[in-house]
Image (cartoon, rainbow, N blue to C red):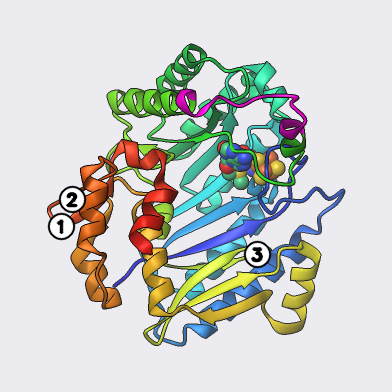
Amino acid sequence: MSAFGLYVHWPFCAAKCPYCDFNSHVRTSVDEEGWAEAILREMAHVAELQGTDRPVLQTIFFGGGTPSLMSARAVERVIDVAARLWPSANDLEITLEANPASAETARFADYAKAGVNRLSLGVQALNDADLKFLGRLHDVGEAKAALTLGMRTFARVSLDLIYARPGQSLEAWRAELAEALSFGTEHLSLYQLTIEPETPFATMHKGGIFHLPDDDLAASFYEATQDMTARAGVPAYEVSNHARPGCESRHNLLYWRYGAYAGVGPGAHGRLDVNGKRIATVCERLPERWREKVVRNGHGFTDISEIDDRAGAREHLLMNLRLSEGLDLAAYRARWGSALQPERIAALAADGFVKLEAGRLSATPRGMLVLNRVIAELAD
Ligand SMILES: C[S@@+](CC[C@H](N)C(=O)[O-])C[C@H]1O[C@@H](n2cnc3c(N)ncnc32)[C@H](O)[C@@H]1O
Ligand code: SF4
């Protein structure tokens, strides 16, 4: 039975961070129950699309936005209804993304009671000046308190940091990462700061208000990150994700292994397997418009379409190569009826960008730094 997961997007945040281009919106008040109701309706619609022979649900992921602004009651309703709509795995992984502000940590125990068993905490930086620069509402003290409470409350905890920040030295990042590793979480998501178009950071960057590390320094940041996490027993298993072996995010692995998942809530994307066909779903991004659509149609999709083999093969390649385990060439050929070109693989391997071991193709650390180019070479 192939893996299946549910992604639930909660699109609201207490404030918009200037670097963020996620589908997140600030609202003065949110009618919790109404939004939860719309999410439940869209879940039921997806399940109906799948027919009566539904896949086994293995993961639920509450992402955002800031899902730790949801009431525990709303989280519980989603979990309960999911368990009624799909047969569930015994060891269902249920993750919730949380910001470390104190109002949200107060809800941790209730989330755990509702069934959440994995917390992903947006720490982002371990010094107050950088947290301020990133527009975060929490300080280091709150982040550490949230981490301590999170690790006491949930069986599994991950923390997020953003590095290669303007003005950050390699030494400063090494010290910060060493501190992050000392907390002993089983999982860390470590993202290099990217400047997303049309964000306040894009304007500031263009105006020369701050500068990012050049390519060489960015590569040194990445290498130091790989090296330190591996030595601490939480090696990279994906471009930006690190875990103790066996403690990877099963939900995110499902994306990168190109499994099937439902995506509900404003702006969510899904990949469903229906009658042997791979279906892509895309939800309306603007929360209020999405909700109107759900009320009217039972779902907020702006697009639902079949992915043909060519597009599916490309997505499969794109996702698998993010993983250190890479892509199983035989499985890929069997699924899509076409193989990657051996001469392209050989050329990339000769240049040190990919390696081929026991039938699996993966990017080397050098290849990971230019992954988009490697994928473009292989996919053309
Ligand atoms: C949707 S957010 C996580 C949830 C929560 N709202 C938070 O911010 O902590 C997902 C993660 O993406 C990362 N992220 C978002 N925008 C980024 C950017 N421009 N560059 C690097 N990392 C970014 C942050 O580390 C963030 O924790
Ligand atoms: S809290 Fe998270 S989702 Fe919201 S704006 Fe900040 S980074 Fe984006």
Viewed as shown, does residue 137 lie left or right of 177? right
Location of the N terminus (image quadrant):
bottom left
Q: Is residue 33 above or below residue 278?
A: above
Give me the C-alpha separation between circle 3 and circle 2.
39 Å
Residue at image coords 32%, 70%: 2
SS class of the residue under badge 2?
A: strand
Please name which of the two marks, 3 or 2, marks the residue nearer to the observer.
2
Q: Position of residue 275 (x, y in %)?
A: 40, 87
Cα distance in 3D space between marks 3 and 1: 38 Å
Q: What amino acid is at disc 1?
A: Gly
Q: Are marks 1 and 2 in contact (CB under 8 Å)?
A: yes
Label 3: how many Cα within 10 Å (few below 14, some 14–19, many 20+): many
Q: Which mark is residue 359?
A: 1
CB within 8 Å, label 3 to label 1:
no
Assign a secondary structure to mark 3.
Answer: loop
> How many labels were placed on the picture?
3
Residue that badge 3 annotates: 265
Q: Is residue 298 above or below residue 106?
A: below
* Pointer 3 or 2: first along the chain: 3
In which quadrant of the rendered image does the C terminus lie?
bottom left
Q: Which residues are magenta?
A: 204-217
- Considering only vertical position in the picture, is 228 above or below 202? above
Residue 226 visible in this rendered orientation of the protein:
yes
* Residue 108 visible in the displayed image: no
Q: Which residue does the numbered mark 2 point to in the structure image?
A: 356
Residue 198 image position (x, y, % from top left): 74, 46
Image quadrant assignment for residue 248: top left
Instruction: Name the side, left or right, on which 273 lies relative to 159.
Output: left
Furthest-left residue in this view = 358
Residue at (58, 34) in percent of width and height: 193
